[in-house]
Amino acid sequence: MYEVAVQYIRREMAILRSMKSAPRKDAGWRNGRIGQIKARCKGQFEGVDIYKPYIKKNFRADSLTELSDDELQKTYLYVFKKKANRS
């Protein structure tokens, strides 16, 4: 039952971190999102920053730190919906 409980807590935490009010309530939200985006790129896309063309095209930004909270959340969702092309 421990694993089931851990999965439940992780799922609920993901829901809470995705809420529109999360950036205001969690001081580490921005740094956490940026870290998660970069870790996903490093782990799943062999270090290729797949978010860069996306933020350039959609938000005219060169860095994740230039994005608003809403833009950062959209970029997070974009990166985590992408599938790695593996042969």
Image (spheres, grey):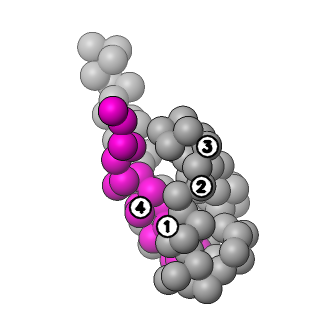
Which of labels 3 and 4 is toward the front? 3
| Circle 3 SS class | loop
Residue type beneath disc 4: Leu
- Given contact means CB atoms under 8 Å apart, are the residues at marks 1 and 2 in contact? no
**CA distance separating discs 4 and 2:** 14 Å
Q: Which label belongs to residue 49?
A: 2
- Residue 36 visible in the picture: no
Q: Earlier in the sequence, mark 1 or mark 2?
A: 2
Which of labels 1 and 2 is toward the front? 2
Main SS, magenta region, reads helix
Q: Nearer the viewer, residue 63 or 16?
A: 63
**CA distance separating discs 2 and 3:** 6 Å
Please tell me which residue is depicted at 48% across the width and 39% down the height of the picture. Answer: 44
- Given contact means CB atoms under 8 Å apart, are the residues at marks 2 and 3 in contact? yes
| Circle 4 SS class | helix
Left or right placement of residue 62 versus residue 84 in this view: right
**CA distance separating discs 1 and 2:** 12 Å
Crowding near the residue tagged with mark 2, few <14, some 14–19, many ≥20 C-alpha atoms within 10 Å = some
| Circle 1 SS class | helix
- Residue 34: give x, y in percent of width and height: 64, 56
Crowding near the residue tagged with mark 1, few <14, some 14–19, many ≥20 C-alpha atoms within 10 Å = many
Crowding near the residue tagged with mark 4, few <14, some 14–19, many ≥20 C-alpha atoms within 10 Å = few
Q: Disc 1 designates what residue?
A: 75
Crowding near the residue tagged with mark 3, few <14, some 14–19, many ≥20 C-alpha atoms within 10 Å = few
Which residues make up the magenta segment? Answer: 69-87
Q: Quadrant of residue 19?
A: bottom left
**CA distance separating discs 1 and 4:** 5 Å
Q: Which label belongs to residue 77?
A: 4
Residue type beneath disc 3: Gly
Residue type beneath disc 2: Asp
| Circle 2 SS class | loop
